Image: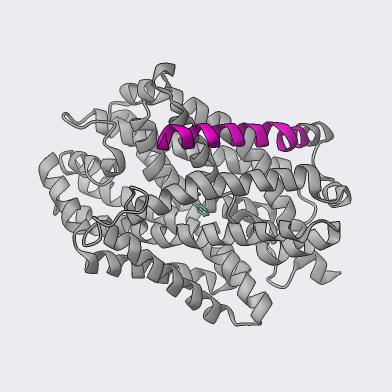
């Protein structure tokens, strides 16, 4: 019984630790780096609206389903799914869902570590004043120089993965639990500090107009697909991370309420980051909001290099990005590590090293996409763009769709009833409706239209 309640990896000390851990997983490069630039290149407001709708109507129900499966299984996603499938007495092929999630997770970790490495290197680049007074060309040249240098990229990717191993090695309570309880309050404080700064020193009005002015003509199916894929990516759903964290959640807590809190924090951080970044961008002449992936690494450094106190604010900003990426990446490593510990009875350190090395080697593909391998194309993408598109726009929606169908139609009702005791019956009804009808229909339609738009 004790094992059933806690599982072999232990549990979070409280509901609050779960909330911090899941928020840590959710809030990452997706919120601070990717959200502002995809909102910028998809025209701002309308995209934001669709994105928020995807979070609320699709993301939250699927995330609840994932937490529920994890908490019931009390194991790594692969083994949890296997147990739940046999407990429900249904087709064993459903158990592959655990694998799909973990595979997407390791692919994401591989490129995530490289980009997080850019952020780490920018703490020093900006803080040491190398970009003081830089104009757009100088900042672009500095960024290109970083991307053109595989050894620098590999160095920072390795530092980042080492930081992740250092946390995950410590286990659920002393590693992950302590890390998120320390890092998340720091992250929120820094973000609020930057928000205050951007209200006083940036062009906050223009930023707010840009993000909240709903201009529907700019919206295409492709941008709706992008908004949905991003909703999955930013909530960390569809790849085992949330299922693994759910396995360490206390039994009595309400899944519905907890997930809503996490989704709220995640969206708030995305919007606040967008406001901070665009306030700075709009206050600096000659920078476009639609600058794409370089928005954070080219446009912002120009702004930081030219404002009073900018070096300090800039270094703090990139510390924020690194912390956010760190608390996310550990949740990509944990499901794989937990699986090896359970299945092969391996020590945590060894299991961590194995997956960190796999992610590191795969990450070389991303490293080389920006320099010596930039001509190498897969379906018209560089290796990095291919992985990004494959995971966020294909694997995550498919995995999300299957999770919705599995919990909506397939899983044994008794499992659902026992896990959802703490959740309001009305919320449960809405949740079931979302999983059975809304999510499958929306994910299916957007997915097909989005691919059609992209490739045909
Ligand atoms: N949610 C993270 C982000 O927005 C990315 C992530 C995906 C982290 C999956 C963990 C698992 O950056």
Is 191 magenta? The answer is no
Give x and y (percent) for residue 198.
Answer: 32, 33
Residue 305 occupies which quadrant of the picture? top left
Report if residue 41 is visible in the image.
Answer: yes
Residue 303, placed above or below residue 327: above
Residue 121 occupies which quadrant of the picture? bottom left
Give x and y (percent) for residue 425.
Answer: 84, 35
Range of magenta residues: 432-456
Colour logic: one colour
Residue 397, placed above or below residue 170: above
The residue depicted at 45 percent of the width and 27 percent of the height is 47
Relative horizontal placement of residue 311, taking residue 341 as reference (left or right): left
Give x and y (percent) for residue 330.
Answer: 51, 62
Residue 317, placed above or below residue 438: below
Q: Residue furthest right?
A: 414
The residue depicted at 50 percent of the width and 36 percent of the height is 268
Q: Quadrant of the C terminus?
A: top left
The residue depicted at 56 percent of the width and 73 percent of the height is 170
Report if residue 74 is visible in the image.
Answer: no
Residue 428 occupies which quadrant of the picture? top right
Is 437 magenta? The answer is yes
How many numbered callouts?
A: 0
In-front residue for pair 442/377? 377
Q: Quadrant of the N terminus?
A: bottom right
Relative horizontal placement of residue 119, taking residue 287 as reference (left or right): right
Relative horizontal placement of residue 331, taking residue 285 as reference (left or right): right
The residue depicted at 27 percent of the width and 64 percent of the height is 153
In-front residue for pair 356/448? 448
Give x and y (percent) for residue 380.
Answer: 33, 47
- Label the magenta part by its dominant secondary structure: helix
């Amino acid at each position: 019984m004790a094992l059933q309640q806690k599982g072999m990896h232990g549990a979070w000390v409280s509901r609050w630790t779960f909330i911090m851990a899941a928020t840590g997983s959710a809030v990452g490069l997706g919120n601070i780096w990717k959200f502002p630039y995809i909102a910028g290149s998809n025209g701002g407001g309308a995209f934001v609206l669709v994105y928020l709708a995807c979070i609320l109507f699709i993301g939250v129900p699927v995330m609840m389903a994932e937490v529920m499966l994890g908490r019931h299984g009390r194991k790594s996603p692969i083994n949890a799914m296997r147990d739940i499938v046999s407990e429900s007495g249904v087709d064993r092929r459903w158990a592959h869902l655990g694998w799909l999630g973990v595979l997407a997770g390791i692919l994401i970790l591989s490129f995530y570590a490289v980009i997080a490495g850019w952020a780490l290197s920018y703490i020093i680049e900006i803080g040491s004043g190398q970009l003081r007074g830089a104009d757009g060309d100088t900042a672009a040249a500095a960024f290109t120089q970083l991307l053109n240098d595989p050894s620098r990229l590999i160095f920072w990717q390795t530092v980042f993965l080492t930081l992740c191993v250092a946390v995950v090695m410590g286990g659920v309570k002393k590693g992950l639990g302590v890390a998120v309880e320390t890092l998340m309050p720091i992250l929120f404080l820094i973000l609020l500090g930057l928000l205050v700064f951007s209200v006083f020193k940036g062009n906050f009005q223009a930023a707010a107009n840009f993000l909240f002015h709903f201009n529907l003509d700019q919206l295409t199916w492709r941008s709706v697909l992008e908004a949905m894929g991003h909703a999955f990516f930013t909530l960390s759903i569809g790849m085992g991370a949330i299922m693994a964290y759910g396995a360490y959640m206390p039994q009595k807590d309400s899944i519905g309420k907890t997930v809503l809190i996490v989704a709220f924090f995640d969206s708030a951080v995305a919007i606040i980051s967008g406001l901070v970044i665009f306030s700075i961008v709009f206050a600096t002449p000659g920078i476009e909001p639609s600058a794409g992936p370089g928005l954070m690494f080219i446009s912002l450094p120009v702004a930081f290099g030219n404002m009073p106190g900018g070096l300090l604010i800039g270094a703090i900003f990139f510390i924020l990005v690194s912390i956010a990426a760190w608390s996310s990446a550990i949740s990509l490593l944990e499901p794989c590590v937990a699986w090896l510990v359970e299945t092969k009875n391996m020590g945590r350190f060894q299991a961590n090293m194995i997956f960190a090395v796999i992610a590191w080697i795969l990450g070389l593909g991303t490293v080389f996409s920006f320099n010596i391998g930039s001509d190498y194309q897969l379906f018209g993408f560089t290796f990095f763009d291919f992985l990004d598109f494959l995971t966020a726009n294909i694997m995550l929606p498919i995995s999300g769709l299957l999770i919705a169908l599995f919990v909506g139609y397939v899983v044994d009702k008794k499992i659902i009833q026992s896990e959802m005791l703490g959740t309001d019956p009305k919320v449960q009804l809405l949740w079931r409706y979302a999983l059975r009808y809304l999510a499958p229909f929306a994910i299916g339609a957007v997915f097909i239209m989005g691919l059609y738009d992209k490739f045909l």
